Amino acid sequence: MTSETGQRRVGLWLVGGRGAISTCVVYGLSALRRGALEPIGLATETEPMRGLDLPGFDELVLGGHDVCSRDFSKSAGELVSMGILDGDLVVASADEASAYEANLRSGPLDGPDVGMADLDPRSAELGGAPPRDQIAQLVADWQAFEEDQGLERTVVVLLSSTEAAREHQAEWDDLEHLEAALDEGREQPASLLYAYAALSTGRPFVNFTPNLGSSSDALRWLADDRGVPHAGQDGKTGETLVKTVLAPMFAARALKVLAWQGYNMLGNRDGEVLHDPAHRQAKLRNKDEVLRELLGPGERHTQVSIDYVPSLADWKTAWDFIHFEGFLGARMSLQFTWQGSDSALAAPLVIDLARLAAFAARAGEGGVMDHTACYFKAPLGGGTHDFHHQHLRLLEYAARHLKT
Amino acid sequence: MTSETGQRRVGLWLVGGRGAISTCVVYGLSALRRGALEPIGLATETEPMRGLDLPGFDELVLGGHDVCSRDFSKSAGELVSMGILDGDLVVASADEASAYEANLRSGPLDGPDVGMADLDPRSAELGGAPPRDQIAQLVADWQAFEEDQGLERTVVVLLSSTEAAREHQAEWDDLEHLEAALDEGREQPASLLYAYAALSTGRPFVNFTPNLGSSSDALRWLADDRGVPHAGQDGKTGETLVKTVLAPMFAARALKVLAWQGYNMLGNRDGEVLHDPAHRQAKLRNKDEVLRELLGPGERHTQVSIDYVPSLADWKTAWDFIHFEGFLGARMSLQFTWQGSDSALAAPLVIDLARLAAFAARAGEGGVMDHTACYFKAPLGGGTHDFHHQHLRLLEYAARHLKT
Amino acid sequence: MTSETGQRRVGLWLVGGRGAISTCVVYGLSALRRGALEPIGLATETEPMRGLDLPGFDELVLGGHDVCSRDFSKSAGELVSMGILDGDLVVASADEASAYEANLRSGPLDGPDVGMADLDPRSAELGGAPPRDQIAQLVADWQAFEEDQGLERTVVVLLSSTEAAREHQAEWDDLEHLEAALDEGREQPASLLYAYAALSTGRPFVNFTPNLGSSSDALRWLADDRGVPHAGQDGKTGETLVKTVLAPMFAARALKVLAWQGYNMLGNRDGEVLHDPAHRQAKLRNKDEVLRELLGPGERHTQVSIDYVPSLADWKTAWDFIHFEGFLGARMSLQFTWQGSDSALAAPLVIDLARLAAFAARAGEGGVMDHTACYFKAPLGGGTHDFHHQHLRLLEYAARHLKT
Amino acid sequence: MTSETGQRRVGLWLVGGRGAISTCVVYGLSALRRGALEPIGLATETEPMRGLDLPGFDELVLGGHDVCSRDFSKSAGELVSMGILDGDLVVASADEASAYEANLRSGPLDGPDVGMADLDPRSAELGGAPPRDQIAQLVADWQAFEEDQGLERTVVVLLSSTEAAREHQAEWDDLEHLEAALDEGREQPASLLYAYAALSTGRPFVNFTPNLGSSSDALRWLADDRGVPHAGQDGKTGETLVKTVLAPMFAARALKVLAWQGYNMLGNRDGEVLHDPAHRQAKLRNKDEVLRELLGPGERHTQVSIDYVPSLADWKTAWDFIHFEGFLGARMSLQFTWQGSDSALAAPLVIDLARLAAFAARAGEGGVMDHTACYFKAPLGGGTHDFHHQHLRLLEYAARHLKT
């Protein structure tokens, strides 16, 4: 995976750059560059994807936006105390972490979010500015980053907290109406402004959150029109991943699922935000809808909940109970408990997606990156939620693009 | 799925005909014919398989061999008391059950098995006869059955208990040597004799057990030579099914499985037989090998055990613990508990396989039925254990053969 | 446990007499009398309680009130189909069940409950009558039952569905005020009317539900004043039982519980009623308070929820996750899954309590039966929720009263 | 808990002093002395035990024997990487750890154990010496330690790996015969030599392992005769603790346990040793016998297994499945998963026991410390395994001895 020096540097811009996932991305990439870490969790380091001409670990340059002002090393310290980041690794990557922190900028606060403890006042101010001004600021930050670092292009990845649910706005359905709304200064979700800013200026955009991002018709049209690749939404990291692997098994065996109850617990900042019902809504919808598609029509009881359990911190713990009927009406059950670090699960997917988005952009591909459906709870391109089918599409994409 | 009356009757011959799986097949088919049961668990009743010209439920005629003499209604009573069979359904199917019992014959006892409580003395005697005589008796039983019932053909399905493990015999590698060994009267596993008797006389053969059956090179050659379809081995009903669905997920996500411990408990006759280490060996080998193939090379600790817990009866309960490493070395786990009725899970697969075998025979297909790999822990045709890949092969087979 | 014929017949009056628990009591007692059932689940059949001169199984005569009109045999049929009641047992007890059904009367509907499908119109009417009239009707029903059956006394056991939560009323704090409120015709919870009717007429009262019953100061005063034994409230059958056994272990070992999450699922009529937040409130409060008492002061996160999962029917399934800290700050966890039939767990406790209440009444004991705390989630007598401490009190009571 | 300076220093001698439990004791005590750690897991820091005049954390002086030579800091590093010890705490306690390591001596290797990688050659040599010589060496080491450190007395705690199972020897039944056997130079388990050396010289002895230690009649006699307190055997830290809390619940509720399957997995040095069936035997016996006592007579299936899963390291993971029958024959289940650090669970119990043993010795109490039964899987004093009953005995002991 050699590269011509200098010309291949790609920016990976993390929105939510002081959060736990970003912290894992920053330290993880640093350790990968040093060869101090196995590339576990990175599908792009397995066959056939590793045969693609993806940006190398040393070709990715990191920067980001955030709305809080807390020290980046504090995020790292918390992950060390949770047993996720290794203390020695943090020490060894201190210089790279400092370089990254120098590339962090204040991002616009989403309108409804106001109560955060360590809120960056410039973010609050920016969030209150007219949307066109916010967009201009984002683009200016990226341009400065690219010039400073001598980058070929920047991939923007949305990793911010779940935004409060909003009513659907008619202007999201049509690019012309959206442009008009922006001109009129109508307030928009921060995630939409990021997506607009990126796609309208030719920067690939990945929405790893359940936020609106580029999922509206207006933004899809924009991406298609400008020929910019984008992907999303809502990273499939844990319980939902297992769900989309198990549910097709029941369908394939013609077993009748009577009930599927999913209980999620987590204690990180994401959990704190999701504690608020307004923020939880979008997340739960994505988690529950996969079952409807995978198990087909029929009467059954499904439920999914997320509870905030502070002591678990980043260690997402989920229990699913599946009640099903077999031949002769016999009632059976499968239950599973998933215990994983949400951030350590998400970080390699972010790196995978950034590499794939950069690859697609370089290959001149625009619009929804259908082959990344396996990374998302609610893939923009639609289609089945069956993980294995989705994964086959990624394998096929890689096979088609293998360099010759 | 109409049929020309009389000409389409297909025999489904159950070896182990007094056991729990056969009992579920007999009562289940009876209820399906009456329309008193949903076809849950039958993949052949879902699209696209249901579009194939498979034998209908009312076209399957049941008979079987067994080595024990206990009353068939006793088997049914036990399943009722376990909450698997419905009491009313048993009463409503009493006549069909009697008709079936009239079609049961004494099968040869496998040499090493001698201690059974309700052993049929004719089975012991037959098991001690020269192998050619045993084969002749089996064929004679089938011919009489076919003539009595006016059958188009008979599919033989092996559902007997796990045989004691044996050293590999050189004669199994080559049909000529096997024929010679049979001529010389060298003792053979009962499962091999059933397979030989069926395949050599053109009868499709399905091995749902971990026993040798038709899996040796000699028997495969025989099936290819005579153009008879066969399938096996070791039905994938429960814990292993879940394993072959979950393991590919870890591989696809490049997560590193450190340990996979599987603890199985069951209390039915199968559990009793498996309590004996000599019988357990083959079963455990099949259950463990799937992980090796699915997770690829690498150091990891896998273990699978089966314990006999009488109170569970047919309710197989399994706990699997998967310890894995994610990005940054974070240690995570997934554990699941499976609670299912082994017989109610197996019975619809038996019906599926019998229908598919009859279909293949009618279509003139001989040799290993590769498209049935998803039904087995150790598919004769080899290939991946990835359930979803296996299932795609079944779907593709069905799509190719859809009647026009 | 011989008895002088005729003089020792004791009435066991089941409020909620057509429900699942009552059904289990009726058929279970019938089978116990015939010697067709092991006395599993009955602590009164173990030492030292079995040494007490308790009413024998053949001395208990059953009757009851309910607000629905559905056939009693329908309740039995449902329990058979759930695998809880044995079909043969139901047939063998048919005469006793009919005799019981003849003793069922229409009880008053609790005011806020109006929407039930099979509501007995006489119950709705009675529930709308002035409270003094309702009480008079209950007493009249009991008197007629006692005369018809030649009973020594009647123990009233409340097994009705959870009532909608109500604001605390000042009149409940004082008997005089309550009497005045009744005179004025102020509406009261049905459970309070049952308790008042029983205690004011010298009939022992057991509240197995989370409903108000005899738990107010006014009613306690009444019971003390009349010297009538009463017990309650909210039977400790499953998940809470396990909680009150495990929590003291953490306290005794000085382990620091950080979080205790309890997720309950059930699908019976009780589950349906609890689906309504107004009804769920009282139940959840009792389930959660035990942890506060057992684990002592300190910051921790506890949560308990009940979800209605229809397919589970009477099979209550609960998952508890306990996150705790050990020495050196190490984070550990214990999780358990409980799968039990709620009604089959409750029924023997009802029989135990009825026998103990009859024994206490005969012994001239009045007021709260402190020794029965181990049977309840919110024992009327207060004290620790530690099950083993509570159980020791029962053992000590029995030892004190052993017949000489 | 003030003390007269100098006169109250008590030695805590750890046999297995380089192992994981000892490492947790050493760093934990150091942090407790600095006030840098909450006393979680220490029952002696809760009421009423904390009212006893126990040796304070700053009064305990640590030393020990081991048969391996690996660096103590290596043990600490392993526990840090497992997420059990905190890296900062290790740094802060470095001086105390060095002081401790200076007090470590070579102990005798148990005869049958020969294959260890980092075996201390002096241990092998000492283990081959005549038993009287081994005893003399142990006593000499303790005397030197006490003189150097100015100690009031030394409590010897056995934390060594599980010894290979041995045939019962007649000489263990009688002190006179044991003395003769020692005189004759007949080989003895190392654990017995430690117990003999301690008890014969007036040093309290605690056996935290399943090894023979002081459990034979000969050694009990010795302890009684010399008036020396001793306690054991086999620390009750995890799965068995939960068992002895849950099993009495089933008995108290008269529920019929049909099967209790316990599967333990661990990957530390203890797990490695237990991987060998000869070493596993004693451990499993203790784990299984508790159920027999607690559940009473009756036919049931119980099983307990321990598997070595290297990746789990010190994180003992256990799954127990309890199948039980309730009223009316309904079959129910309870299953639990325990995930805890074995060493972090054991260390505070070791500190508790050392403090209690020093207290008993100072109070002039000799023989088995019956009040410590709650700490052991196989308490020397016998009695019930019911944890809550055992714990009440500790509370009563403390209440009796509260200083006035």
Image (cartoon, coloured by chain):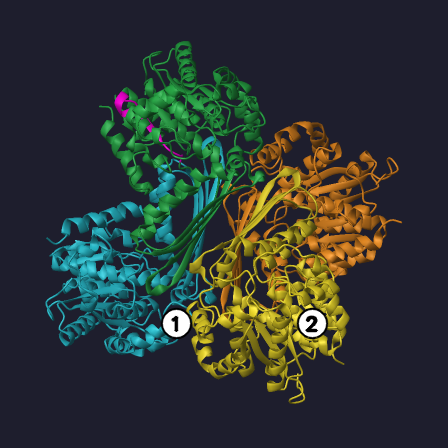
Chain colours: A green, B cyan, C yellow, D orange
Please name the amino acid that badge 2 sits on. Leu
Q: Is residue A225 magenta?
A: yes
Q: Is residue D86 magenta?
A: no
Host chain of mark 2: C
Q: Is residue B7 visible?
A: yes
Q: Is residue B307 visible?
A: no
From this view, report whether residue B351 is shown above or below residue D208: below
Residue at coordinates 35% horizontally, 48% vertically from top-left? A247
Magenta segment boundaries in residue numbering: A223-235
Residue D295 — which label? none
Label 2 sits on residue: C199
Residue at coordinates 49% horizontally, 71% vertically from top-left? C120
Residue C22: x percent and y percent? Answer: 54, 72
Residue A223: x percent and y percent? Answer: 30, 24
Residue C397: x percent and y percent? Answer: 74, 70
Judging depth in this view, the residue of A126 and A145 nearest the camera is: A126
From this view, report whether residue B15 is shown above or below residue D145: below
User: Is disc 1 placed on a helix, strand or loop?
Assistant: helix
Lateral position of residue A201 relative to residue B380, left or right? right
Residue C315: x percent and y percent? Answer: 48, 62
Instruction: Give the quadrant of residue D147.
Output: top right
From this view, report whether residue D140 is shown above or below residue B288: above
Label total for image: 2
From this view, report whether residue C305 is shown above or below residue C29: above
Label 1 sits on residue: B80
Q: Residue reaching furthest bottom?
A: C5
Q: CA gap, disc 1 to disc 2?
A: 46 Å
